[in-house]
Amino acid sequence: KAGVTQTPRYLIKTRGQQVTLSCSPISGHRSVSWYQQTPGQGLQFLFEYFSETQRNKGNFPGRFSGRQFSNSRSEMNVSTLELGDSALYLCASSLAPGRAGELFFGEGSRLTVL
Amino acid sequence: QKEVEQNSGPLSVPEGAIASLNCTYSDRVSQSFFWYRQYSGKSPELIMSIYSNGDKEDGRFTAQLNKASQYVSLLIRDSQPSDSATYLCAVNRENNDMRFGAGTRLTVKP
């Protein structure tokens, strides 16, 4: 069974640009959530999607957005990039709603903003 | 007060010893609790989940939950060098709002 797949794995952008990250969940998993991980702040919740609907959102500015498609694949977008957006972005899937919290993480997309 | 607090470590134990990792949380309505292990350069992986007060054992791992004290712990028996990693405590609050602790770095010395 394939795991959670995230693309791209690494990317470098400059301030002011935008970026789109993609996530394919484990087959059969309908919930996808996104996290930002930095050395200083740890793992911080961005948002969660289930059946193409955003069910929950963390405390991030509106520059961070996401969506989920009918096949459960998800994308997140960060516009007007700032240096502080440099981080590892992790996508996780779960068998929502009964197994929320039991997350399976992808390998992440490491974003560097110059 | 942070929502999920863990000692950052590092925690160092000799091989074969018991490693004890602790976590406290602030939101009393939290219902489910998790321990994730993250090796350096890798993504977190779920190792334990616990939903009710008491102990839950899985192999060398035991999770303990005390909702009255808002306290979760993870015991690793017969620690191995391969257990060296950062352990993240996670709490699922209402509306599936997951919060992670900063993690405790564990080193098991041969």
Image: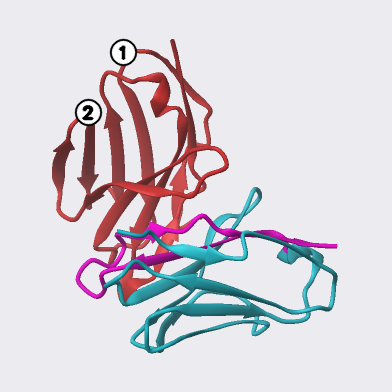
Residue at image position (30%, 72%) is A29
Numbered tag placed on residue B89 in the rendering: none
Q: Which chain is cyan in the rendering?
A: A
Residue A78 location (% of width, % of height): 67, 78
Tell me which chain the residue with mark 2 is part of: B
Q: Quick one: quadrant of the C terminus of chain B?
A: top left
Question: Of A90 and B9, which appears nearest the observer?
Answer: A90
The residue that label 2 is drawn on is B60
Residues at marks 1 and 2, CA–CA distance in whole angstroms: 11 Å
Question: Of B11 and B66, which appears nearest the observer?
Answer: B11
Residue A58 location (% of width, % of height): 51, 74
Numbered tag placed on residue B16 in the rendering: 1
| Labels 1 and 2 in the same subunit | yes
Q: Amino acid under label 2? A: Arg
Q: Mark 1 or mark 2: which comes first in sequence?
A: 1
* Mark 2 residue element: loop
Q: Amino acid under label 1? A: Gly
Queried whether the magenta region covers residue A112, the answer comes back as yes
Residue at image position (31%, 51%) is B34
Q: Which chain is red in the rendering?
A: B
Asked if residue B14 is positioned above or below residue A23 in the image, the reply reads above
Residue at image position (55%, 58%) is A108
Residue B12 location (% of width, % of height): 47, 19
